Image (cartoon, rainbow, N blue to C red):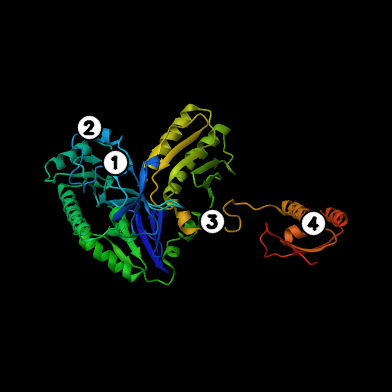
């Protein structure tokens, strides 16, 4: 599989596209104006303790206070007098009260595990995780865990055997990432040395800084892409920005010594993404409907509470019978749904409404195919069995805004409803507003301004109703239309 990573920079915005065999598979945007705090470590100060929620608000020195739950506040690696040392501690910790753990004004070192979303502040934890290329270091733990996606028993045993021979300081645990499959003791040792140096620097910063303050910043987008996405299947990295090109070269030299990576600077006139024919594909990422090659399509609706995805046969009529048509559409859709989840970086609760199928074998095959497709996702996912209604419910790790939320604002015109009142509705509402305004007075001249569509409706279909209102209130109603006026606006003014 040919894998390319494209990095384009324009107007203080970085865009990263990951292509597999020329097809867009993942897309990321980062703007210099947007505050990026996921993964950062802060020395904060407890601002408020809320026993009813089992949580506390922590002042980080950022725009919004962080939110720290009691379970996320226990057994910090910076607590030199940890209350529990035995294996039963986690069970007992669960019953601790937030007011017994944190006090107002107390200093606490925390890491951001979820960016601010909407009106919610960032979610915090005192259980730190520091990622490197193949390992994630977990200070305060002493276990070595292996990613579930490394599913071959022989490989898991090989990795465990390597770690038994490594000299690891006490009080430090590790998670072995999926990219570590097949890697040698040398690569693991390099990561461990890097992470221990980083942890030492963090410790030093904590003693030097006053709360609230930033202790450690996570890598920026380009550096994270190299760390998390570059692998043996990657053919090349291309960027159209000289500063980013130099930054990539420097990062590779210090972070991935000895690795041969094809990095090139793009100098052609045509925009980088246009050269690779992905601009239209990126634009389609923000559309509600996604069309399949067969003629079917999926509809993706993002709400504050969950993401709803509906699968439809559309123009696809099949060649044999309805069951086969539905089965083929669902099988194609499940691959595209998994891809769209990665592309749009949606998170939280996701409900997928596949088209109903009668045969149990088809439902089982579809579920297996979808689970296999989602395995490629780097975000943590949990998929429940298909329900009797044919729904697949799942969760996907959400740590930042979705791609759509990062690029779009709520429409000021419809205020997020996605709909506005029709001209007929507004014409009727105008008459009601006039009747209410003229209810306590008679013999007045009133000017009414509405959108042109409602204006035409009033002057034609609702003409008689207006005449009746004028007669009953002994008033004169003058209506004008304005194409620039919001469709739901009604402006009523009295002349005398």
Estimate how packed mark 2 is, as few (under 14), some (14 to 19) or many (20 or more) residues with alpha carbons within 10 Å. few
Relative vertical location of residue 227 with respect to residue 80 in this rendering, above or below? below
At 37% across and 62% down in the image, what residue appears? 7
Give residue 88's mark: 2
Identify the image quadrant of residue 16. Answer: bottom left
Estimate how packed mark 3 is, as few (under 14), some (14 to 19) or many (20 or more) residues with alpha carbons within 10 Å. few
Q: Earlier in the sequence, mark 4 or mark 1?
A: 1
Q: Is residue 235 visible?
A: yes
**Pointer 1 and pointer 3: residues touching (CB < 8 Å)?**
no
Estimate how packed mark 1 is, as few (under 14), some (14 to 19) or many (20 or more) residues with alpha carbons within 10 Å. few
Instruction: Give the number of the mark in front: 1 or 2.
Output: 1
Instruction: Give the number of the mark in front: 1 or 3.
Output: 1
**Pointer 2 and pointer 3: residues touching (CB < 8 Å)?**
no
Quarter of the image that includes the C terminus: bottom right
**Pointer 4 and pointer 2: residues touching (CB < 8 Å)?**
no
Real-space Cα distance between discs 4 and 1? 63 Å
Q: What residue would you read off at disc 4?
A: 438
Q: Earlier in the sequence, mark 1 or mark 2?
A: 2
Give residue 410's mark: 3
Left or right of 233 in this view: 166: left
Image position, residue 150 (x, y; %): 27, 40
Q: What residue would you read off at disc 1?
A: 100
Instruction: Give the number of the mark in front: 4 or 2.
Output: 4
Instruction: Give the number of the mark in front: 4 or 1.
Output: 1
Q: Nearer the viewer, residue 358 or 201?
A: 201
Q: Earlier in the sequence, mark 3 or mark 4?
A: 3
Please, what secondary structure does the residue beneath circle 2 have? loop
Please, what secondary structure does the residue beneath circle 4 have? loop
């Amino acid at each position: 599989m040919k894998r390319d990573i494209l990095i384009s920079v324009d107007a203080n915005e970085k865009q990263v596209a990951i292509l597999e065999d020329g097809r867009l598979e993942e897309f990321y945007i980062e703007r210099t104006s947007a505050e990026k705090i996921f993964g950062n470590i802060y020395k904060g100060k407890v601002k408020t303790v809320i026993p009813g929620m089992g949580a506390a608000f922590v002042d980080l020195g950022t725009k919004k206070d962080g939110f720290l739950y009691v379970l996320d506040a226990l057994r910090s690696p910076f607590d030199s007098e940890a209350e529990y040392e035995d294996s039963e501690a986690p069970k007992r910790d669960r019953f601790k009260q937030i007011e017994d753990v944190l006090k107002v004004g107390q200093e606490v070192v925390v890491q951001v595990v979820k960016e601010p979303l909407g009106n919610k502040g960032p979610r915090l934890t005192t259980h730190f995780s520091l990622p490197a290329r193949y390992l994630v270091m977990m200070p305060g733990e002493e276990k070595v865990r292996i990613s579930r996606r490394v599913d071959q028993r022989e490989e898991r045993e090989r990795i465990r055997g390597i770690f038994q021979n490594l000299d690891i300081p006490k009080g430090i645990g590790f998670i072995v990432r999926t990219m570590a499959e097949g890697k040698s003791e040398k690569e693991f040792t390099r990561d461990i040395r890097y992470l221990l140096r980083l942890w030492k620097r963090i410790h030093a910063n904590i003693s030097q800084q006053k709360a609230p303050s930033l202790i450690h910043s996570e890598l920026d987008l380009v550096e994270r892409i190299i760390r998390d996405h570059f692998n043996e299947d990657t053919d090349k990295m291309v960027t159209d920005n000289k500063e980013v090109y130099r930054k990539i070269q420097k990062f590779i030299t210090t972070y991935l010594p000895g690795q041969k990576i094809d990095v090139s600077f793009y100098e052609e006139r045509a925009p980088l993404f246009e050269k690779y024919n992905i601009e239209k594909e990126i634009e389609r990422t923000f559309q509600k409907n996604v069309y399949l090659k067969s003629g079917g399509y999926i509809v993706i609706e993002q709400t504050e509470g969950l993401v709803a995805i509906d699968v439809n046969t559309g123009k696809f009529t099949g060649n044999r019978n309805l069951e086969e048509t539905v089965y083929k559409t669902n099988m194609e859709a499940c691959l595209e749904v998994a891809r769209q989840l990665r592309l749009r970086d949606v998170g939280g609760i996701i409900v997928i409404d596949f088209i109903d199928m009668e045969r149990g074998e088809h439902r089982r095959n579809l579920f297996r195919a979808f689970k296999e497709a989602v395995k490629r996702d780097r975000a943590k996912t949990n998929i429940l069995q298909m329900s009797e209604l044919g729904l697949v419910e799942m969760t996907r790790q959400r740590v930042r805004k979705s791609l759509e939320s990062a690029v779009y604002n709520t429409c000021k015109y419809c205020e997020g409803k996605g709909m506005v009142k029709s001209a007929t509705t507004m014409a009727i509402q105008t008459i009601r507003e006039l009747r209410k305004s003229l209810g306590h007075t008679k013999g007045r001249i009133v000017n009414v301004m509405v959108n042109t569509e409602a204006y035409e409706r009033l002057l034609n279909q609702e003409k008689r109703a207006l005449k009746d209102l004028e007669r009953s209130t002994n008033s004169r109603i003058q209506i004008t239309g304005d194409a620039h006026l919001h469709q739901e606006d009604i402006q009523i003014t009295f002349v005398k």
